[in-house]
Image (cartoon, rainbow, N blue to C red):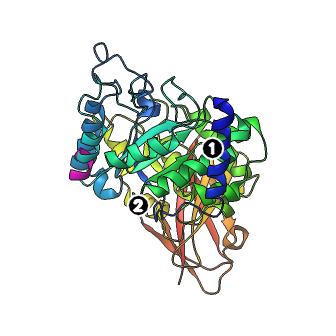
Amino acid sequence: MANIAAVWLLTISLVAWHCSCLDNGLALTPPMGWLSWVRYRCVTDCKTYPKDCISEKLYMEMADHLVSDGYRDAGYVYVNIDDCWSALERDKDGTLQADPERFPSGIKFLADYMHKRGLKLGIYGDMGTKTCGGYPGSKFFMESDAMSFAEWGVDSFKMDGCFSTATEFPISYPIMGQWLNRTGRPILYSCSWPVYMSHLHPSANYTQIAEVCNIWRNSRDIEDSWAIVQDIMSFFGKNAVNLSAIAHPGAFNDPDQIIVGNYGLSYDQERVQMAIWAILAGPLLMSNDLRNIREESRELLLNKNIIAINQDPLGIPGTQLLAGDMQVWMRPISPKGSFALAFLNFLINGGGPKQVETKLTELGLTGAGSYNITEGFTGKFIGLFKPSSTLTVRVNPSGVFLVVARPV
């Protein structure tokens, strides 16, 4: 009987939501910040791993480095808690509560800590009965959880999809979005909706998803692995459901976290991830140890030219123009008629850098007059090129050559 009542309540809530879409004015450009999952997973043993466990201390230390090391001023403002932050049980009133040993000061304290430093706090939950890590989910508690997040001062909420079914996603994700709206607090809404639908049910309604969520995960989870970065890029390169046409300011595809500064990528491969996430207009949510990061990786993450492409106000995601071992990706950017172009070299037996020659017209640069072309990472002037001109670049193995072309 209780289950029937719960389903009825969900149905009524859906009717109430039907004409209401997410309306929080957030993510007009892809959100930037730091997220714990890839680097720290669900480490909860703070005695054995005091520097790596999911605790208020970890998030406070990362926040301090965002401020002191220049990340905040570059745009990285979200500090996002992921799974395993809560107690294993709700309190006697059914309210979510933080683990008392690892978060003794509570989530509101942590949100206040971020806000005093010009940062924002994100938190994690699940639409099922449990989170993926086995902690309390939001099923049947969506209204009260949304109110808790707002009362704590949370600025972003990521809702996962474990312990649920594909038929629930088009109902439950919109309901949670509506409850977030009704709190009156602007809370960025990150959904895992389509990534689960792609595994369980092929017909994810991206039009609805873009109306409900600020950002949404599309493909597999990222790992600290070059092969998986390539796999995610391949998914977006195929663009099977025209993802680039669905996203827009306030609603962006999310290819998952930035792993620059960890163990799995070479420097050239880190450049590839930064360039392609900029081309895709993907959120720049780092998952690394900001307390101990290579200087070259830090400089990449803070590269103002890459960030400018990623944060371009037009909010138009790029697409893959040429697939295969030598790839070309393109994104329209402002001012109108300008483009960012990424040339990638995935030749397995390519030896040294590969020289690529192509006419601008073959890349779709067919405007009247000339294009001012600069190198994408440094901003260095390359030359003035007419549409009929040939552009020559040299691309390192597992590397990228990025250019920006603006009409003159």
Expressed as whole percent of the image width and height from the top left, the position of residue 217 reads 59, 45
Q: Of the residues shown, which amino acid type is indicated by label 1? A: Leu
Decide whether residue 114 is among the magenta residues: yes
Q: How many marks?
A: 2
Disc 1 residue crowd, few under 14, some 14–19, many 20+, Cα 10 Å: few
Task: Residue 240 in the image: state x and y as whole percent.
Answer: 76, 52
Name the residue located 54 percent from the left edge and 27 percent from the top edge.
130
Name the element at disc 1.
Answer: helix
> Does residue 349 appear anywhere in the picture?
no
* Quadrant hosting residue 356: bottom right
For the record, the magenta segment spans: 113-117
From the top left corner, tell me how far across and down residue 146 is, in percent. Answer: 45, 46
Q: Residue at point 55% right, 60% down?
A: 22
Extreme residue in the top direction: 48
8 above or below 42? below
**Element carrying mark 2:** loop
Q: Nearer the viewer, mark 2 or mark 1?
A: 1
